[in-house]
Image: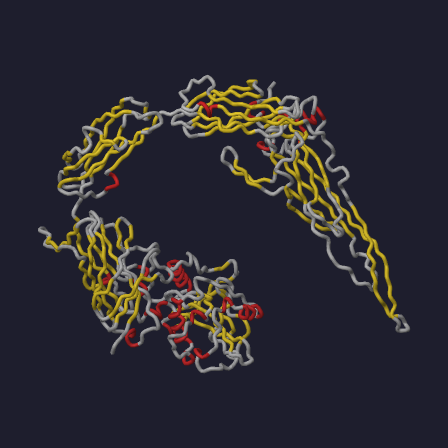
Amino acid sequence: MRIKITTFLIITVLILGVSRYSIAEPSKEYVPPRTPPLTKSAAMVDDNKFLELHNFGKEYFVSYNPALKLELNMEKYPEFNNTHLLFYGNAHGDKGSNGEYRYIGVNDMGENLPNIKYPNDVTPAHQYLEQNNWLPTPWQRIDVKQWMRERGNPIYFNPKLDGRTELRQNIWWGLKLMHGDEFRGDETVPWEQYVHVLQPPTFWGWGWGIAWHDEHDGQGILYRTIPIAPEWVRIKWVPNLYVKNFDPGTPVETDPTTGATVYTAEPFTRYTATVTFGIAAENEWIKRPPPELPIFIGAAHQIDQTHHKAVLKYKSGPGSIGGLISAFPWGAPVGYKYQTVTFNANRAEIVAQFDWTAQPQSKSLTVGVNDWPGFRYLYEGDTGLVYADNRLTVPLTVKPLPDAYVANINPGTALTEPGREYHGTVTYGLQANFPGPVEVKLGLTHNGWPVSGIHERTVTLKPGETITLPFTWHGQKMGQNSLIEAKIWPQKPTLKDINWQNNTRRVLIKSHITDIAVTNIAQQEPAVAGTEELATVTFKNLGANTETFTAHYFAGGKLVKKDKITLPAGKTDTRNFNWAVPGTPGKTITLKVVADPDKKLPDINRANNTCTRDVRITAPALPEPYCQGREKNSREWTVTYVWTTTNSKGETVTHNRDVTYKEAISARLILNTRQGDDQAPPEERRGAWEIKPFAKKHKLDPNKITRAGYGFEVLVETDYWTDWETKVPTGAAPKGGTPRDLKLQVEFWDTKGRSVLSGPVELEPIGKREAKGHTYITWALKAKTHTLSDGRRITDRKHYTDLNNYSATEENIDKGRYYVTVSNINDFGMTGELEICEEDSVIILGNMYDDIYTRPGRE
């Protein structure tokens, strides 16, 4: 009889440098017990190990499910070798005519597990299950979900379970064993497309599913319980795979000491290996093959834990080898490739070949099939778990290669000056792992030009020996760096090297370059006449070295500040300086910053040592009440209701009545700097040491005083009320409609009367309540996350002021007045004619640096 057996297989090779490496060891090894677990606790432990291996987590089953508040229970099936089914809770639902409940329990998601012993709700329309009109992908169907909801049952799609082709065999065997004569055994039905998997199978544990069909006979959607067989049931009929012999394709030698055969390979050389593997089967698998065989996996070609995949090519034997595929069931090692292998006869053997490349210092070469422990235990048939013949190892000798290297280059300087002579050394070596001396050629260049006395010189090095040679070189012209490169090449007895990465070493010596640039002066415009401004300057070191220099700051030709700055190569730095704005509106003033004004540095570009900026001067704005005449707090309007009645004479009488309604809005703006709050964190009241005495002296609220650069909280409380349609006449129909929601915005005005943040920003509601017709809403700025100078990250709803603000003084408090206005964005309420406008202010007293450089006095 001609038996066609199609399976999947990887055949790869393993080169072992030392004995501690093993073949494709899994991250978690699971060995199923030879006999089924008989207690609930033992079954839970074994099922969890199996499911963890297949990526379902560490504790799929627990003895008590706190989310469901249910205990774990077990049902055993003595008729199927004491296999079991785990579930939560107890039997429930309506009782059938045979006394069985409709459900045996629930799964971990709370989905009901139907009872296979519960009688059919209606007489089956067909003799065999295969004849039913099954509904495909039920987890996606609206009609099935609606059917489940009507019965109070949830349905959840699980991509690890639903629609998985590798479960088709388990479903096939479950139907065969538990549905008996109703199942014809058709192997072409894609059962995984019809069955919603409620619980996965394990090695000894049953999975469970449900499927729906509609025969369009007026009875609507019907369901059937679908048992999913354990792996033990499915793999009983799997044959034994083995590797018979293996020739790596290298020359063969005999070890003079042991007489053993040794395969000798050249390093980094490609060889073609030949392997014979086969399939031995004399059990039920030959009599009755399942609809699809499991997948077999080969060992890994591993060198220092690096996997190399080999591709099988068919050579001879009763069968064939397909191309690479990527599909593989749950639990497969990541990164592997797979091939289909078809045996066309019982006890067949196929000869295949694959290419591999020899690696240095390797001791053996291994080829395996079905050798990953996570698979070999599960899929090696019922013939005593025969996996000892799944691997063959041959001794391998890879001829050694020398490892010549450049150990070090010491150029004798870190920076160069044009034309200056420098004296350096270079060290070459030979690693000690080669058995004899090696003749090598040396190389040494400076910017590509040979260094005399060393370049292309030939020397002989002993294993483990190093040689250090002196050399002389000269600095290039200003701005041109020097690259010194050393190389070493084996010459005899071989031109090859085991590691070409260390045969070359380079060192770059930079030319001594000084170039300090003033790149920018940042200043808000226009500047207000008669005020004080703060400008920010950016410096950058474009040179090759850390430099220390002075900087002079000018406003209108007048020196206002001197600074000493140290700046590493390639880095930038910013500095601030204050300057007084002249009282001449309409004119401009020039700001100028000069780096190294005394020309003490050998700067190669003096042009970028100076930066200027012209700033326009404007007259101070006259403050006026922002919200004056803008508020409309209440509205009233009249609507007419018309309705009809019938009098005692049967005549229709028309009625109408005018009703007046009202609506009102109020708002309260709350600003809080927290500088006067003793319970606030210290970092939020750093200026309190000066602010609180100032507030007490001038009878001000310290929580409305802050520093330039600090933030403050903004809250708005609104109260909206309307009596809309609370007075509808009896018999009249309501007009309908509800008030439109309110949207608020806030705008900030600095001490110079300028709007900041590029205009208003929207507030968001953070609290809402309703009572007696009133709607109360609390509004705040949107939360933002800031990174502090110490690296900490904080999130708050504060508005932060800019450093470039005036400060209040003892004589003029209003000079530091920082205004906040709140208004509605949209037309809101019933009429859309209400308006909100609230304004308040905080006072700026000094800036944040006063709390860093200034300390309060002590008595």
Q: Nearer the viewer, residue 667 or 178?
A: 667
Quarter holding the N terminus?
Answer: bottom left
* 343 vs 469: above or below: below
* 779 vs 33: above or below: above
Q: How is the image coloured?
A: secondary structure
Q: Residue 341: give x, y in percent of width and height.
A: 28, 67
Q: Residue 110: give x, y in percent of width and height.
A: 51, 63
Question: For this view, does 556 lie left or right of residue 19?
Answer: right
Quarter holding the C terminus?
Answer: top right
Q: Residue 673: give x, y in percent of width and height.
A: 64, 33
Q: Nearer the viewer, residue 419 or 466?
A: 419
Question: For this view, does 109 lie left or right of residue 329?
Answer: right
* 29 vs 126: above or below: above
Q: Nearer the viewer, residue 258 or 5?
A: 5
The answer to which image quadrant residue 460 occupies is top left
Question: For this view, does 140 lie left or right of residue 203?
Answer: right
Q: Nearer the viewer, residue 845 or 692?
A: 845
Evaluate whether residue 707 shows in this view.
Answer: no
The answer to which image quadrant residue 185 occupies is bottom left
Q: How many marks?
A: 0
Q: Residue at x 36, y 71 (%)?
A: 81
Q: Residue 333: give x, y in percent of width and height.
A: 34, 57
Residue at the limit of the structure toward the right, as seen here: 649
Evaluate whether residue 149 shows in this view.
Answer: yes
The answer to which image quadrant residue 300 occupies is bottom left
Residue at the limit of the structure toward the left, as seen here: 256
